[in-house]
Amino acid sequence: MEIRHMRYFVVLAEQLNFRKAAEQLFVTQPHVSRQIKELENEVGVPLLTRNTRGVALTEAGESFLHHARKLLSDVQIAFDDMSNMARGTAGRVKFGTAIDFVGSELSEMLRQYHDLHPQVFIQTHIDTSSNLALQVVRRELDVALVFTPLPVEARFLESINILPTQLVALVSNSHRFSSRKRISLYDLRDDIFVLWSGTKATFGSHLDQLFREAGFRPKLLHETNSSTLMKDLISERGFVSIGTTATKHPPHDGYCRISLKEKSAKAIPASLVWSQDNPFLKNIDFLQIVRSVFA
């Protein structure tokens, strides 16, 4: 039994006339008759009675019509769902982001995309840029918002630059430099540093160059992936850190960002990366929303 048998039967049951059914299906009457006969042989009972006045449904035909309509409806829904998934407008999307992007912009990006495509469920995963890129390579993630350059294993990923970012100092609102818009990293040489584990993993070479340019080695107390601990160590304990301008506003109250004078703190690109054959990015709404929100 094939889907076409169901479709021919439903059309004939609605028209109760072989000629009209054939016209609607754009086939010949004998072809419709053969398809219906095949269907009846398959189900094992007559579905129609035929006489000079036309066609009538048997009791079995009435029952089968209900099931055939439901089956065709389910098949159409399935095809529509697959088509939407191929266009990236339905299904589940596994989205990765570096912790630096977590903030009001990320929330706004997800809200805007959900408003456009409410059938898409987005699962967000936070990690370092290197780990996220490798997860995209392994198809564990569909798309990720990361800092570049990426690991060599991720060199074949598709990517698009979203925005340039800078490294900045993170200090408490009560810090002696909190009112300044710009300082030299050297000004913090006597402070104790705490770093995001993700920032160190992503910007290791940038950080090394930054501190070399500033002319000192930082007094590093701790590395953490905990935003709660980071907030407490900076805002309550008086430590300082290095962050980015990936979001327009600091992710937490209690501390602020200060631009750095060092040249090596400038122009660190952020990109969206995905696998070339991933159907999700065929829908450019996601790209456009990310660019507009973070630009």
Image: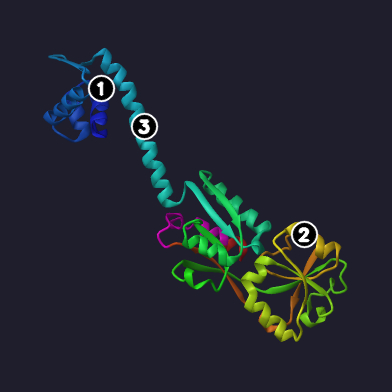
Q: Which amino acid does label 3 sit on?
A: Ser
Residue stretch in magenta: 276-290
Left or right of 269: which side holds 244?
A: right
Q: How many labels does the image show?
A: 3
Which is in the foreground here, disc 3 or disc 1?
3
The residue pinned by badge 2 equals 229
Q: What residue type is labelled 1?
A: Ala
Q: Residue 207 carries which label?
A: none
Q: Which residue is drawn at 50% across and 68% down?
A: 160
Residue 39's place in the image compared with 224, above or below, is above
Rendered location of residue 239, percent (x, y): 82, 69
Tell me which secondary structure the magenta stretch mostly adopts. Answer: helix
Query: Is the residue under label 1 in contact with that under label 3 (CB below 8 Å)?
Result: no
Can residue 292 be seen here? The reply is: yes
Q: Crowding at label 2, few (<14), some or many (≥20) Cα neighbours within 10 Å?
A: some
| Residue 271 location, quadrant | bottom right
Can residue 184 be seen here? The reply is: no
Rendered location of residue 260, percent (x, y): 74, 78
Check disc 1 and report its element: helix, strand or loop. Answer: helix
Image colouring: rainbow
The residue pinned by badge 3 equals 73
Q: Which mark is residue 13?
A: 1
| Residue 47 included in the magenta stretch of the image | no
| Residue 279 included in the magenta stretch of the image | yes
| Residue 68 location, quadrant | top left
Q: In the rendered image, which quarter contains the N terminus?
A: top left
Distance between the Cα atoms at labels 3 and 1?
Answer: 16 Å
Left or right of 261: which side holds 285?
A: left
Check disc 2 and report its element: helix, strand or loop. Answer: helix
Q: Which residue is drawn at 44% across and 69% down?
A: 156
Q: Which amino acid does label 2 sit on?
A: Leu
